[in-house]
Amino acid sequence: MIDSGSINFSKNWNGKLEGIAFTTLRLYNPERYAVGNIHQILLKKIDGWVTDFGRARIVDARKIFGADLNIFICLLDTGYGVEDTKKILSRMYNGKDIDKQAFSYVLYKYER
């Protein structure tokens, strides 16, 4: 078990943080997003309040490039289609070329 700090969300995309398990797309970082790592899941709201969803363990993590995003991944992760998800990621990651960008597609399960 490796306690790896927190993972911050600015929005609860697709209501995913309220279930038993959820996915997230993050810039590729195989050490931070390694299977077995545990993160505190935090949702930061515009008014400054933070919701703590508890600790979640990484069950699986895959390297994926933005060009390989598909409707299956995008709808589950963000609730949006492929092009809209790419626009969201581009805003989140300061205009990076999303198609060429490597991501960690991470599957978490809460430790509840």
Image: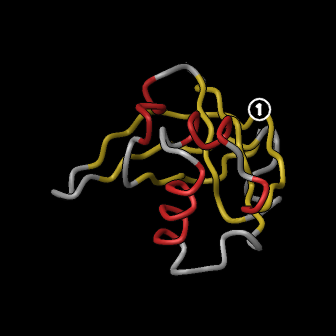
Residue 111, horizontal then vertical, whole percent: 60, 24
Give the residue number, with chain letter if any, for mark 1. Answer: 59
Quadrant the C terminus occupies: top right
Q: Is residue 18 above or below residue 77?
A: above
Q: How is the image coloured?
A: secondary structure
Task: Looking at the picture, tell me which residue is in the foreground, 21 or 78.
Answer: 78
Task: Looking at the picture, tell me which residue is in the foreground, 89 or 33.
Answer: 89
Residue 74, horizontal then vertical, whole percent: 60, 43
Task: Give the residue type at disc 1.
Answer: Val
Q: Is residue 70 above or below residue 30?
A: above
- Residue 57 lies in quadrant: top right
- Residue 27 lies in quadrant: bottom right
State left or right for residue 23 relative to residue 8.
Answer: right
Q: Residue at x 46, y 71 (%)?
A: 91
Residue 96, horizontal then vertical, whole percent: 61, 79
Task: Looking at the picture, tell me which residue is in the foreground, 39 or 95.
Answer: 95
Quadrant the N terminus occupies: top right
Q: Residue at x 72, y 62 (%)?
A: 66
Q: Is residue 43 above or below residue 88?
A: above
Q: Assess disc 1: are there few (<14), some (14-19) or many (≥20) residues with their C-alpha within 10 Å of its C-alpha.
A: some
Q: Residue at x 67, y 46 (%)?
A: 3
Residue 11, horizontal then vertical, whole percent: 37, 49
Task: In the displayed orientation, state which residue is furthest to the left.
Answer: 47
State left or right for residue 44 relative to residue 87.
Answer: left
State left or right for residue 66 relative to residue 23.
Answer: right
Identify the element where label 1 is drawn. strand
- Number of residue marks: 1
Q: Residue at x 64, y 27 (%)?
A: 109
- Residue 93 lies in quadrant: bottom right
Q: Is residue 103 above or below residue 4?
A: below
